[in-house]
Amino acid sequence: MQIGVDLGTTNSVVARLDENGDPEILENERGERKTPSVVQFPDDGGVIVGTTAKRNQMEVPDRTVPRVKRHMGDQDWAVDIDGEEWGPEAISAEILKKLVADAEEATGEDVEEMVVTVPAYFGPKERNATLNAAKIAEFDKEDIELLNEPTSACLRYGIGDTGAGTVFVYDMGGGTFDATLMNVTPDGEFEVEGVKGGQRLGGEDFDDELYDHVRGEMIDAGHPDPEDNSAMKADVYEKVTDLKHDLSQTESGSISPMVGPGDTFNIDLSRDEFDEITEHLVDETFDYVDALFDHEKVDATKEDVDELLLVGGSTRIPKVQERVEDYFGMEASKGVDQDYVVAEGAAIQTELEPQGGGGGSIVLPRDIGLKTVDPDNDKETFEMILSEQTPVKASESKRGFRKIDKQSPKITIEILEGGKALAEENDKLGEFELKNLDEGSDPEFEVTFTVDEEGKLHAEATNLDTGRKAETTLEIGLTEKEIEGHIQRSEETHDDSVTRD
Ligand code: ADP
Ligand code: MG
């Protein structure tokens, strides 16, 4: 069987095509259509993924990993479980394994191939990490296809069947916000024209605002501070999330958090108050949208948008819908549940020719450049070579680089990603050296960065005086040997687990 997987920051969803060729959601072992993307390593061994892990997270925070997707591609990030480091790929693999096991349980069929969706905002590192997570979950590279989430939404809405156009996808989930501008070419291909995203902006921020509000009311009324009691805190969080969901349906609601043994405290909240408390978060999403349209590499304007798609659970919030529709002066396409549109689109993709490059050509999500020193103030700064929003495959060169220390026989080129003014604020992707330079010489260098269709970065530096070159191709992510090690560890971890969740 082939499945489509929306491997979300907050929730994951699995779908396949039914016998009529229509997408159907596969329920997990608990009968849920969404599986929380939360992984937990209980004290007594094994791994739990999903609702149980989410429920217990405040009791065992050190052994629970929510939102691992935010860390995909970060090779320095890992959680320590009993002295073992679990990186983002290894943790994500546990989610995939659970989703696959549940899909097999639900259908009685083996999962042979899967389409896994990724944000268009994911760059080469993040995409590679996602592929490696699937490998750790024991899928061969040929059996996995990555698909951009906005492309998936387009497929589900049948955009592309009806001809060319410009599509804007506003995706706000639990932990991230993604704005994607896409072109559908006359022959139905999807091209990403621009992406902007907030890796730290989503529904959970709305929960945090509500939590702060409710906490304030509790303290003002003389009740204990939920910050001092993890059970109370968990209770308030659960209830504010429910209240937020209710307020998408009703004009007002109330919750009664625990304030002591057998004692609760009632708090009312109207939708208007909720909108006011969270207005700045919605504003922030439009900062990204504005920045996308303002970017010099993006030609389209918001008036060019022909189709507007809303994706992600947080776009259920009426104020969010209203503001997006106001911004574009048009109605969003409706009819597919925001929570399932991505997984259902991925299920449709299982039957289509691979989209390549992750679902239509992609653009660089962040500026890539190198570290230089500003001669005026000796500050280490970022010098851009490849701009964000540049379609991949891409190549750019820049000249005018010189040695900082004229006596040095070499220069080291540090490759950075991020586009922030100060070098240290960016992520380092790698480095390479041009050696054997004459001491005291002052040659000019040219630097060329190339990103291929697979997202691999090739960097080259040329000494323009001598013509000598140095180059590197960045190896991103885990080695095959490390992946093998993770496969084995995961199996061992599962061996000593009792069946749970
Ligand atoms: P992700 O893509 O990050 O995995 P989802 O698309 O599943 O996330 O969205 C999850 C978020 O959507 C959560 O923060 C959840 O509270 C929010 N959400 C779900 N339903 C509603 C609703 N009816 N009203 C408001 N927010 C909702
Ligand atoms: Mg999502």
Image: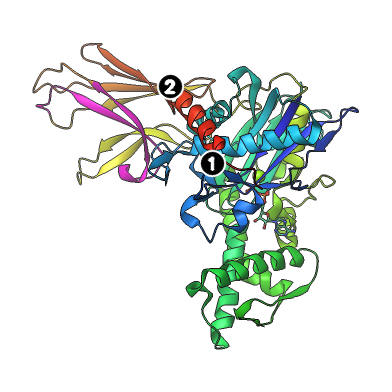
Q: Residue at x 62, y 69 (%)?
A: 235
* The N terminus: image quadrant: top right
Nearer to us in this view, 71 or 135: 135
> Mark 2 belongs to which amino acid?
Lys
**Nearer-N-terminus badge (2/1):** 1
Nearer to us in this view, 284 or 153: 153
Disc 1 element: loop
Above or below for 1 versus 283: above
Q: Residues within 10 Å of mark 2 (few under 14, many from 20)?
A: few
Looking at the rendered structure, which numbered label has been put on residue 481?
2
Looking at the rendered structure, which numbered label has been put on residue 480?
none
Q: Residues within 10 Å of mark 1 (few under 14, many from 20)?
A: few
Which residues, given as a range, are shown in magenta? 406-433
User: Which quadrant of the picture is home to ligand 1?
Assistant: bottom right
> Mark 1 belongs to which amino acid?
His
How is the structure coloured here? rainbow
Q: CA distance from mark 2 to mark 1?
A: 41 Å
Q: Residue at x 56, y 50 (%)?
A: 288
Total marks drawn? Answer: 2
Residue 392, image quadrant: top right
Residue 251, image quadrant: bottom right
Location of mark 1 (residue)? 295
